[in-house]
Amino acid sequence: MLGKASVISNLVILGVGITMCLIFQRTDILRELVIIFGFIFLIPGFVELIYVLSSPGRRQNQFVRLTGWISAIGGITLGAVMLLTPQSFTSIMVYVFAFGLIVGSLNQFYVLGYGYRPLRFPGWFHLIPALVVIAGVVIVASPMLRYNDPVVVLVTGIGLILIALLAFMEMISAASMNHAAKKRAVATTTSSHHSTASAPVSEESAERSDHISKSDSSVIVSEGEQSK
């Protein structure tokens, strides 16, 4: 269920990023994006809520379940407010965009370092979240960029696309590495079985050789006695 939730969430993020890149030049872009971001918070919030409700309440997962509840309720609440009152969010959307890019990138750094342990990803995977973090910081730090709505929307859309694609690359790479590890384990097991099976055969061959040698010796002795 967790894997399906991650796929759905990243598909939503990818779709929003592509949409932002396609409509960044529209005049009322910020209001429209408030509505889109309302859905981007609302849908993953419901997905997370379903996951929390369907997972068993084990003691060792209490912290994970608590964070899941907070994430689900927060996402649903924020998404609903953004959909109901989009005008109240237009003035802070630039900061929301920057914050989303930075938090999403930091989350990817965590996933690359600890999310798939003991698997290790190529070093260039870390370049993508680093670039997205820089983009988020520049959006907030640069007044010229901060008040240029189309550019902010375009940069944010590209950043979301990169984050979603990186998440899918992580899933594919992890599945590939796990598959390769399983193949190596099967090959090692098969090799050990062959080695174990060949040992009795060798012992049997040695016994047959000893039997043949003894038979030959008896024949030679018999011939010697006959000559006498």
Image: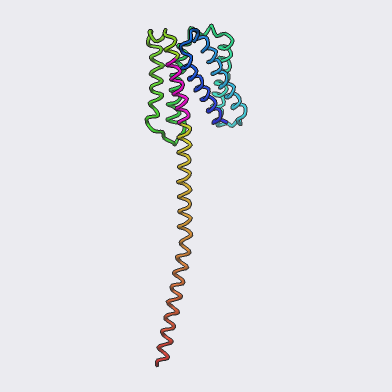
Picture quadrant of residue 153: top left
Q: Residue at x 47, y 28 (%)?
A: 167
Quarter of the image where the C terminus is located? bottom left
Which span of residues is magenta-colored? 154-169
- Residue 110's place in the image compared with 219, above or below, is above
- Residue 219 in percent (x, y) is at 43, 83
How was this image coloured? rainbow
Q: Residue at x 51, y 21 (%)?
A: 15
Prevalent SS, magenta region: helix
In this view, the residue in front, 189 or 148, is 148
- Residue 203's place in the image compared with 126, above or below, is below
- Residue 161 in percent (x, y) is at 46, 22
Picture quadrant of residue 148: top left
Q: Residue at x 41, y 24 (%)?
A: 129
- Residue 69 in percent (x, y) is at 57, 22
- Residue 79 in percent (x, y) is at 56, 15
Q: Residue at x 48, y 20 (%)?
A: 18
Is residue 221 shown in magenta? no
Quarter of the image where the N terminus is located? top right
- Residue 214's place in the image compared with 32, above or below, is below
Q: Is residue 39 left or right of residue 22?
A: right
- Please count the marks in the image: 0
Is residue 159 shown in magenta? yes
